[in-house]
Image: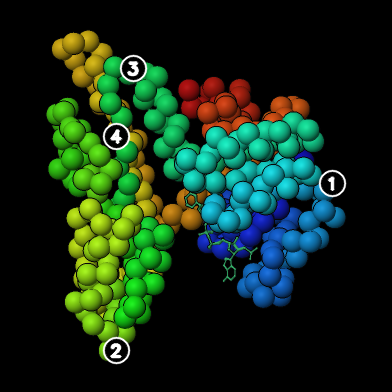
Amino acid sequence: MKKTTIGIVGYGNLGKGVEVGLKHSVDLELVGIFTRRQPDQLETSSPVYHIDKLVDFKDTIDVLILCGGSQKDIPTQAPKMAELFNTVDTYDNHNEIPTHFEKLDKVARNNNTTAVLSTGWDPGLFSLNRLFAEAILPKGNTYTFWGPGLSQGHSDAVRRVEGVKHAVQYTVPKQEQVDAVKNKKSLDYNKQDAHKRVVFLVLDENADEKKVRESISTMPDYFYGYETEITIIDQATFDRDHTGMPHGGTVMRQGKTTDENTAVYQFGLDLDSNPEFTAAVTIAYARAAGKLAKEKQYGAKTVFDIAPSYLSPKDPKELRKELL
Ligand code: NDP
């Protein structure tokens, strides 16, 4: 069987995760990595090309996996690339997903391509599980707890505080709230009260510790209003304990099947590497994009629109026998 050919656009954490993850997929084959930087700047043994060369691969690449950042790269890159290629992205700006969908849908339908958007785990697998849980238990409440895990946005924000040399921020769900939902107790949930922000940082030599602590805990949008724990550590501890990118979380729904009986639906992830797992989900959706395009199912698709069997390299007959 001919393998589905893949191009990676953008070589950051996610792009590297896709490169590694493709090695586990027997039916997918990496053609090349496309970057805005000079190709020889990238440390990899895979073929690397400047992004301007992408058009030359129009007939050799079945699906492009877009690994740029959600804030600046995907909104411009995705609609442009969907003119020529089938695409998959991990766009995670939840409020803007409907707009991203509309734009991509128009481009993809006009050009007979398939554009799968907002894959990954949240949005992605968590979204699917919120949908399953709500459809199955219409009378109830859904809760999402993020972490424990490293938030890149919050870590960056702490790094920008004067006097901070290195920093990481972990988002930690409050266990008593997670347990309350699990134990079928009612919970007055809001995102801010349900999570704690835990910061580890290395200070610059002459930093004013009190000022640093205050700047962090009063930072609007990021920390203000959250329970925030700040620990100062030395460089060696930072290098030893805080250079990974773990994440995860849980989607839960408490629902009533009758007035007397409650059901708790739970889906959880515990990830040593957020980008590697996000990449793994995206690879499965790239496979789906290839199949959908072959069937001429063009336009934008989210995880809600794609049947699960499209994600698997196995054929439906095999799946029915082995996994149903
Ligand atoms: P990075 O910041 O590591 O990479 C983003 C882009 O920046 C790359 O594609 C690359 O483009 C460029 N870049 C990377 N490293 C360098 C460098 N050293 N110098 C110059 N440019 C560089 O982002 P991530 O890969 O960590 O994340 C990508 C997106 O994935 C995030 O924005 C997030 O929205 C999304 N995501 C989604 C999740 C989900 O569950 N849906 C979960 C986790 C992340 P180029 O090669 O062209 O220079």
Tell me the residue that label 3 is attached to.
138
User: Which of pointers 1 and 4 indicates the residue nearer the eye?
Assistant: 4
| Residue drawn at x 53%, y 39% as measured from the top left | 97
Per the model, the C-alpha gap separating discs 3 and 1 is: 46 Å
Tell me the residue that label 4 is attached to.
143
Q: Is mark 1 within 8 Å of ligand 1?
A: no
Tell me the residue that label 1 is attached to.
59
Name the outermost residue toward the top. Answer: 258
Per the model, the C-alpha gap separating discs 3 and 4 is: 14 Å
Q: Which mark is residue 30?
A: none
Q: Quadrant of the N terminus?
A: top right
Q: Which amino acid, mark 1?
A: Asp
User: Which of pointers 1 and 2 indicates the residue nearer the eye?
Assistant: 2
Q: Position of residue 246 (x, y in %)?
A: 37, 57
Q: Residues within 10 Å of mark 1 (few under 14, many from 20)?
A: few
The answer to whether residue 187 of the structure is visible from this angle is yes
| Residue drawn at x 54%, y 54% as measured from the top left | 71
Mark 3 or 1, nearer chain start? 1
Q: Residues within 10 Å of mark 2 (few under 14, many from 20)?
A: few
Secondary element type, mark 2: loop
